[in-house]
Image (cartoon, grey):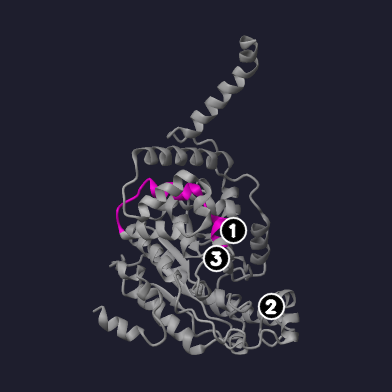
Amino acid sequence: MAKRLLRIFGPLILAAILVFAVLASPVTFGFKHISATRERQAAVSLSPNVLRGKHVKEAALSNGYVPFFGSSEWSRIDPMHPSVLAQKYHRDYRPFLLGARGTQSLTQFFVMQNIQGELRNKKAVFFISPQWFVKNGTRKDAFGFYYSQLQTTEWLTHYRHDAIDQYAAKRLLQMPAAQSDHFIYAALQRVAAGKSMTDYQRFYLQTRKNMLTQEDQFFSGINLPSQNLSRVNRQAKKLPTHYSYSALDQLGGQLGKEATGNNRFQISDKFYNQGLKQEIKTGNLKNFQKNLSYLKSPEYGDFQLVLDQFARLNTNVMFIIPPINKRWQQYTGLSETMLKQFDQKIRYQLQSQGFNNIVDLSDKGNVPYFMTDTIHPGWRGWLAIDRRVDPFLTKKQAQPHYTINDRFYDKQWQQLGPGQLTQYENNTK
């Protein structure tokens, strides 16, 4: 009986052992070559699998693509979108869009963990959304949706006893997604406490990382969504053959006017009809943001993780601070004073540490057809961004000199309220 069972199940057991050995092996087998078409699809796909993975991003970023970190703004693809302009006018770079609805600084910090080689001494673009900086910071369900054990194990296998890793571990432990693997969770607890991991934990993390890396190579590029690439191709056909800022700005105004004919906010008709029209009729949204603040939030600490990582990798980054649709802001009662204070606070966190490449568009919310909806740029807004981003990426830039300060992890900074920035600056000099 035993021999008979061995003949039946032996090959299955052997196959399982071989599969495990391949997956757990530290050797990268390179099972899947990423074609140029796949890279183009992945770069604009906004796919959660691409964001969580490694192989596709590595291939594209090693081949002339530039990481554009952000969130839901990247999905607003019109003729002036960064990906459209780069394709139409044959730029030396192509944006690789990293982010979608719900991605914030903490997710982006972990996204950076398995593309460090492609960020080191390179350039990047980072879009800062004021809406991230709310009272509770990143939503736990949104973080969980984009959470990647591969990125976490990559980070933990390079663990160092310093503020960035300890703070990141503490923040990750606050997310339910951290409990998806008991052994990773236990390692995070030691890191958060400033302790060294055990020999077994280091072995497990390395083995788990190898397995996840091999799985990522097996499945990278499978079923990549192509609809966004089709949208980019269609939008590019609407642009003139030769680049001219004035001509494109005029076209942007024309397209914006045509797309925003049914409401007083200059919001695209499609967005307005789907999400706002009925609520506006009921009056439920009038002054509903009058008590909203972007000044006190754990997001400031998460954002510091991103800055710390960029500094470690000597990445030259251009940061974009967008405006909010002025008409919408006034209707919902969102405080103009608070928005200015947010702008001052985030600029201080950037500039005091040497991050000086900033496209601050926070005062452009009243420019006609600058925004496609309430908070996202479009048409003339994208074009204004491109006017700064293109020369940053295509021309030689001065080497940045970063001076990272761990005080930005402190709750005192995260909870710094209205009118307290000047006093804070004076106390920290």
Whether 218 is drawn above or below 290: the answer is above
Helix, strand or loop status at disc 2: loop
Above or below, 332 relative to 83 = below
Mark pair 3, 2: CA separation: 27 Å
Q: Residues within 10 Å of mark 1 (few under 14, many from 20)?
A: many
Residue 177 location, x and y as percent? Answer: 53, 54
Q: Which amino acid does label 1 sit on?
A: Val
Which span of residues is magenta-colored? 142-162
- The residue at 58%/61% (across/down) is 141
Say which label, 3 or 2, has the lower sequence index.
Answer: 3
| Residue 59 visible, this angle | no
Residue 239, by quadrant, is: bottom right
Q: Confirm or deny contact between disc 1 and disc 3 (CB under 8 A).
A: no
Q: Which secondary structure is most common in the magenta stretch?
A: helix
**Residue 110 screen position, x and y as percent:** 45, 56
Q: For this rendering, which residue is in front, 71 or 206?
A: 206
Question: Which is more N-terminal, label 3 or label 1?
Answer: 1
Which residue is denoted by mark 3 in the rendering? Answer: 139
Residue located beneath label 1 in the image: 44
Residue at the disc numbered 2:
268
